[in-house]
């Protein structure tokens, strides 16, 4: 069946009779929000859950392993959520053949790109009664305003309309970027709830963000000496770990997207010039170097490792800074070994 994203977010519990979800389109932030909503509702209904992440290539290269993952029960959880990234028509037979035999309390979420109407995967999820197909189109200004006002209201933060417009403009119409900016506001609001426009301007242009960007780029390029220099500065100060995790994950997702498109066009420069959001010209040499150092499998593994490390930091707040910077150091060393 087809479901609008706002319908699903408004009444997600009513869709949990289904266990197969296709989230397709360009809005990765919306997909993440819907996935988190499914996780929350399943958790409320079933208690402890097991979370697994796979890429379509992993499944195609080893179908038996995927079926074992799908049909094997969990020792410690009453439900299982499996997320498949980069889903295309190649996976349709594997999914459709097991529809009638699909085990209880196993939920499958497929992240697809902007699938066309003739897509077999999209048609299957649209027509089957046991499946849910949710288009995830790019956000417009009104969507982002609703998200911003909801987050601010939830945290009792008062901002002027001009300040909210400034946050939306800085987000480049990406809800993940918008939420990152609001995280800065939330940290600042611990001592002040009514925040003026000048304060917002200062917060969203915080110099630490610039250093964080450099840290991540040097890390992915394997430039150990530069990385250590910035690392020593940031380690002594308060670091927004969630923000850096998001920036790192976003950069790796961009590298993955370019790598995948490069295999089709065989022209890296054309792909880099066409990618959206566009790469700033000063950053292009760094991105090109990163693309030469990291292959598709390593990038996919990094995404999983970032998610696991973020969870570990949340579970161990006293050690989170050590755990956090250990990940970045290991990534930098690995990139250096490749170069």
Image (cartoon, rainbow, N blue to C red):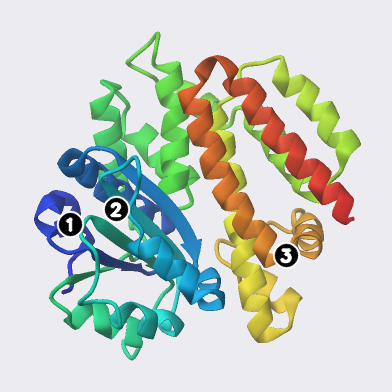
**Placement of 255 over or under 155, stated as above or below:** below
Quarter of the image for the C terminus: give it: bottom right
Query: At which x and y percent is residue 25?
Result: 38, 69
Residue 85 visible to an observer of this rendering:
yes
Circles 1 and 2: CB distance less than 8 Å?
yes
Using the rendered view, name the quadrant where residue 232 is placed. top right
**Placement of 125 over or under 11, stated as above or below:** below
Work out whether residue 184 or residue 95 is closer to the camera in this orientation and state it: 95
Query: At which x and y percent is residue 76?
Result: 34, 40
Name the mark on residue 295.
3
Does 280 sit left or right of 189 as displayed?
Answer: right
User: Where is mark 2, residue-wise?
Assistant: 34
Work out whether residue 255 or residue 176 is closer to the camera in this orientation and state it: 255
Q: Which of pointers 1 and 3 lies earlier in the amino acid sequence?
A: 1
Q: Secondary structure at mark 3?
A: loop
User: Where is mark 1, residue-wise?
Assistant: 8
**Placement of 124 over or under 105, stated as above or below:** below
Q: How many marks?
A: 3
The residue drawn where x is 29% and y is 82% is 96
Q: CA distance from mark 3 to mark 2?
A: 29 Å
Q: CA distance from mark 1 to mark 2?
A: 8 Å
The residue drawn where x is 49% and y is 43% is 170
Could you classify mark 3 by the number of other residues whose Cα lies within 10 Å: few (under 14), some (14-19), or many (20 or more)?
few
Could you classify mark 2 by the number of other residues whose Cα lies within 10 Å: few (under 14), some (14-19), or many (20 or more)?
many
Q: Which of pointers 3 and 2 lies earlier in the amino acid sequence?
A: 2
């Amino acid at each position: 069946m087809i479901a609008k994203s706002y319908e699903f977010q408004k009444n997600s519990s009513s869709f949990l009779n289904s266990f197969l979800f296709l989230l397709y389109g360009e809005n990765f932030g919306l997909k993440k929000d819907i996935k988190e909503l499914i996780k929350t509702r399943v958790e409320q209904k079933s208690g402890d859950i097991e979370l697994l992440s796979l890429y379509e290539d992993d499944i195609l290269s080893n179908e038996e392993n995927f079926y074992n993952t799908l049909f094997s029960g969990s020792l410690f959880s009453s439900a299982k959520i499996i997320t498949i990234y980069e889903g295309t028509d190649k996976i349709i037979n594997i999914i459709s053949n097991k529809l009638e035999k699909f085990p209880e309390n196993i939920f499958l979420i497929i992240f697809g790109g902007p699938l066309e109407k003739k897509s077999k995967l999209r048609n299957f999820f649209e027509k089957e009664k046991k499946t849910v197909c949710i288009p995830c189109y790019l956000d417009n200004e009104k969507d982002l305003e609703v998200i911003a006002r909801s987050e601010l209201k939830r945290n009792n933060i008062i901002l002027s309309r001009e300040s909210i417009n400034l946050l939306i403009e800085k987000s480049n119409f990406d809800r993940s970027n918008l939420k990152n900016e609001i995280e800065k506001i939330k940290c600042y609001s611990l001592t002040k709830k009514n925040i003026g426009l000048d304060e917002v301007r200062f917060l969203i242009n915080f110099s630490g963000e610039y250093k964080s960007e450099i840290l991540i780029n040097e890390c992915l390029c394997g430039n150990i000496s530069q990385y250590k220099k910035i690392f020593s500065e940031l380690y002594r100060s308060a670091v927004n770990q969630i923000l850096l995790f998001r920036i790192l994950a976003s950069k790796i997702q961009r590298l993955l997207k370019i790598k995948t498109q490069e295999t089709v066009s065989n022209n890296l420069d054309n792909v880099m010039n066409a990618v959206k959001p566009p790469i700033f010209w000063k950053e292009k040499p760094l991105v090109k170097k990163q693309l030469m150092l990291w292959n598709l499998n390593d990038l996919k593994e990094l995404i999983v490792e970032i998610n696991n490390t973020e969870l570990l930091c949340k579970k161990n707040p006293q050690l989170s800074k050590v755990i956090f910077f250990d990940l970045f150091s290991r990534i930098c060393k690995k990139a250096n070994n490749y170069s």
